[in-house]
Amino acid sequence: MKKCLKCGIRTNIYIPQHRLALCPEHYINWFEARTQRTIEEFKMFQKTDRILVAVSGGKDSLSLWNVLVKLGYEADGLHINLGISEYSEISEIKTRNFAQRIGRKLHIVDLGRDFGRTIPQIKENERRPPCSFCGTLKRYYMNLYAREYGYNVLATAHNLDDEVSVLMLNTLSWNIEYLSRQFPVLPEENGFARKVKPFCKMSEKEAAMYAVLAQIDYIEDECPFAEGSTTLHYKKLISQLEEKSPGTKLRFYSEFLSKMYPVIKDRRPKTSINRCKSCGEPTQSEICMICRMRNNLLYGKLQTSTDKADNP
Amino acid sequence: MQVKEKIYVLYRGKKIEFEEEKMKVKEILKKLNLSGEYAFAVRNGEILDENQTVKAGDEIKIVNAISGG
């Protein structure tokens, strides 16, 4: 059994990529301090900023919200109920309970109520994979709520494994446009709020261990639509590399940020941003993708099973 | 008649039973097709080492940190 580097007591908690053994108390301190260092390294935000944290009810987002509040930031939550039966019901309950525990405001979007269709209903008529249009909807509502309620920073709990799997995917196809946007801070511009990823250097396992040790009650079930996703496939492949050579993930990502990103960041195509004629949100077209989706679903040729049942 | 104790494993809402008298955490992870790189075991709120042994009658929870989407 290893000993905690800070206090010397025996511990099972060991982080191979940092060659670091810590007791539960010092692990929590280390995790929070490392998040603070990441916030400072990328100049993400300050104590005067108003932060809206996207919270799904999972370990990463609830941990991020907990850490930010403990570090003294003005951080409220936004939860989007996707309407995926029991999974979404439990996610919302856990998020509501957590907001109450930390005493912070929680905004809730209910897709069925606010968009007019849930994710399973949209899936029936969409060619894109669920994670793709679900991501589009989430980004839309996050930006909308940030603007409407006066938050100047949007924080998501994307972790090192999320970033590395996307980096690998984009590198394998040399997608320079996407790579030029893969930075943990995207500035506020053209009606989009500043987006930050304070967990970009924390692995998924580190975040899960933090959630367990900080006694955060999160939803453990995986989104039923995530099964078989490309991201999961890449994460498992990368974990095999990490197992053989601890530190690979962090090195791949950190070296990209310090060596490759500066070379390609200006390759980002210049796009003109308009205001959606229907909802006023920023878009590259006349009508934003969300309004087009909504129009197609509610008034277009495509019908969901509910519509079919209502209008046989 | 004495009822034989088992190792009880909670994993993503399911309760799985192992008949063995004792098992190492890494053996349980392997049976669940998981890797210690992203999964770990918890007993009474305490995170266990991969080489720690779990005995019949113990109830542990397996946390799979990987999420997709």
Image: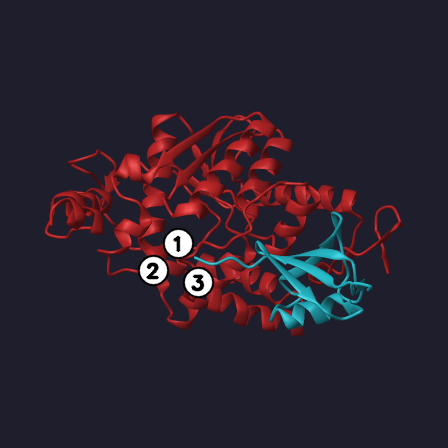
Chain colours: A red, B cyan
Which of discs 1 and 3 lies nearer the camera? The answer is: 3
Q: Residues within 10 Å of mark 1 (few under 14, many from 20)?
A: some
Residue at screen point 57% across, 56% down: B12
Closer to the camera in the image, A169 or A25: A25
Name the secondary structure under disc 1: loop
Q: Label 3 is found on which chain of the structure?
A: A
Q: Which residue is mark 3?
A: A227
Kind of residue sitting beneath label 2: Glu
Earlier residue among tags 2 and 3: 2
Q: Which residue is mark 1?
A: A181
Name the secondary structure under disc 3: loop
Q: Are marks 2 and 1 in contact (CB under 8 Å)?
A: yes
Residue A183 in the image: x percent, y percent? 46, 52
Residue A155, can we see it? Answer: no
Q: Is residue B6 above or below residue A195?
A: below
Measure how far apart labels 2 and 1 are at the Cα level: 7 Å
Q: Is residue A49 above or below residue A5?
A: above
Residue at screen point 48% across, 44% down: A156
Q: Which residue is mark 2?
A: A177
Kind of residue sitting beneath label 3: Glu
Rendering quarter of residue A203: bottom right
